Amino acid sequence: MTANDRSRDVRLLMVEVVGYWLFNMDINSTKLYEKDLLQILLNGVSDEDHNPVQSRSIEILEKYGVFVKEAQELLDA
């Protein structure tokens, strides 16, 4: 799996792709794959190379958390 690739650049690209998917897929696809995509980002948080894979994974997770919270607030209003 590319999330476990030896190359830091490959792992970073995987994190970037997952972030892109989370913010750009339609809602039904996001719901279907969200747990798998978030798992890849969580793996990135524990990456051996703290910069940039780990920091980018944390950044995307935080941004996605805000995104989901704001979407839920809109639904509740």
Image (cartoon, helix red, strand yellow):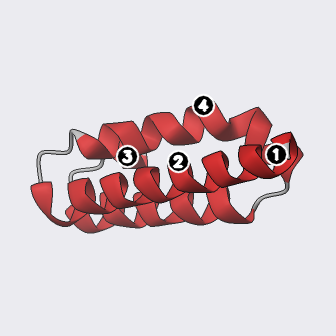
- Secondary element at image label 3: helix
Is residue 7 shown to the viewer in this render? no
Quadrant where the image shows the N terminus: top left
Which mark, by number, is residue 29?
1
Inspect the image, locate mark 2, and give the three-letter code of the amino acid beneath it.
Gly
| Mark with earlier residue (4, 3) | 3
Give the x, y percent position of residue 65. Answer: 52, 47
| Mark with earlier residue (2, 4) | 4
Q: Residue at x 51, y 39 (%)?
A: 38
Give the x, y percent position of residue 27. Answer: 84, 49
Q: Is residue 61 above or below residue 20?
A: above
Check if mark 1's residue and mark 2's residue have beta carbons within 8 Å.
no
Tell me: 3 left or right of 63.
left
Q: Nearer the viewer, residue 69 or 7?
A: 69
| Mark with earlier residue (2, 3) | 3
Check if mark 2's residue and mark 3's residue have beta carbons within 8 Å.
no
What is the crowding at mark 1: few (fewer than 14 residues within 10 Å), some, or many (at least 20)?
A: few
What is the crowding at mark 4: few (fewer than 14 residues within 10 Å), some, or many (at least 20)?
A: few
| Mark with earlier residue (1, 3) | 3
Q: Residue at x 27, y 68 (%)?
A: 9
For discs 1 and 2, the disc positioned in front in the rendered view: 2
Tell me: 28 left or right of 35.
right
Q: Nearer the viewer, residue 9 or 50?
A: 50
Which mark, by number, is residue 35?
4
- Marks 4 and 1, Cα distance to the nearest angstrom? 11 Å
Quadrant position of residue 49:
bottom left
- Marks 2 and 4, Cα distance to the nearest angstrom? 13 Å
* Residue placed under numbered mark 2 in the picture: 65
Give the x, y percent position of residue 69. Answer: 62, 46
- Secondary element at image label 4: helix
